Image (cartoon, rainbow, N blue to C red):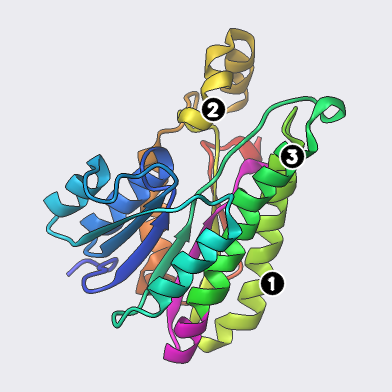
Amino acid sequence: MSAFDLTGRRAVVTGVKRGIGYAIAEGLAAAGADIVGVSATLDPESSAIGDRVREHGRIFEGHRVDFADRQAVTAFAEAVAGDERPVDILVNNAGTIRRAPAAEHPLEWFDEVLEVDLTSGFVLSSILGRRMLAAGSGRIIFTASLLSFQGGINVPGYAAAKSGVAGLIRALSNEWAACGVTVNGIAPGYIATDNTQALQDDPDRSQAILERIPAGRWGRATDIAPAAVFLASDEAAYVSGSILPVDGGWLGR
């Protein structure tokens, strides 16, 4: 049996339709976990990620939830928390980004990014975490960012949200680690996904980014999945309040 075996565990993964969320869900399923997949645009009955999870022999439950709608996120969390089968792993990955200089950044964009990238994760963690606390075990993983540590350019809402995610990870860990519920984050570097497409399409910015990454390449979503499997496993039982960079060496530059 693998040291990172997750057989029999149930994982909620948000932002699961593509990119990092897709890769994490597949990685957890390959390690043995059943997946509750959530996305703002997911077809609950038919999806590529659902098919992929089932190919690994695991159960997939699909849900469509708008993470900018706090009431919808709350209703989903309460429904899942009320299921007979508990949630063992929560991956708060859903996110969005809006790009505009701070002096021109619409307030509604700022509010939207904080709601999706920060508040929805707190709502899910708070509601699903109650049952984890009662059971004395659980794993909560947030997708943080390099901008949990840095300021970025033209993304003030995103930088604020991801810095908030870093603080939330530490705050929840301080309260819950002694109860068997670990709370950690993964900080992806520059990963080739939809969220970074504008940067990939800008030759000057893309070249500057590549020159700054010691590994010499953009990351892939599949680079993130093993970190999630580790943090979800029993091998990470003494890891909490941490943010693991998976960035090709960017932060060490």
First in sequence, mark 1 or 3: give its number.
3
Task: Please give the name of the residue rendered at 58% of the width and 16% of the height, measured from the top-left corner.
Answer: 206
Which SS class for mark 3?
helix
Q: CA distance from mark 2 to mark 1?
A: 29 Å
Residue drawn at the location 40% of the way across and 42% of the way down: 41
What is the three-letter code of the residue carrying label 2?
Thr
Q: Is residue 155 left or right of residue 117?
A: right
**What residue type is disc 1 on?**
Ala
- Callout 1: 10 Å neighbours few (<14), some, many (20+)? few
- Report the number of discs: 3
Q: For the residues carrying marks 1 and 3, which lies nearer the camera in this image?
A: 3
Which mark, residue 131? none
Q: Which residues are magenta?
A: 130-147
Q: Identify which amino acid the numbered label 3 is placed on.
A: Glu
Q: Secondary structure at mark 2?
A: helix
Residue 133 included in the magenta stretch of the image: yes
Q: Crowding at label 2, few (<14), some or many (≥20) Cα neighbours within 10 Å? A: few
Residue labelled with disc 3:
108
Is residue 80 on the magenta stretch? no
- Taking the image as drawn, is residue 77 in sight? yes
Task: Reply above or below: 67 against 78.
Answer: above
Q: CA distance from mark 2 to mark 3?
A: 21 Å
Taking the image as shown, residue 81 lies to the left or right of residue 61, namely right
What residue is disc 1 on? 171
Q: Is residue 242 visible?
A: no
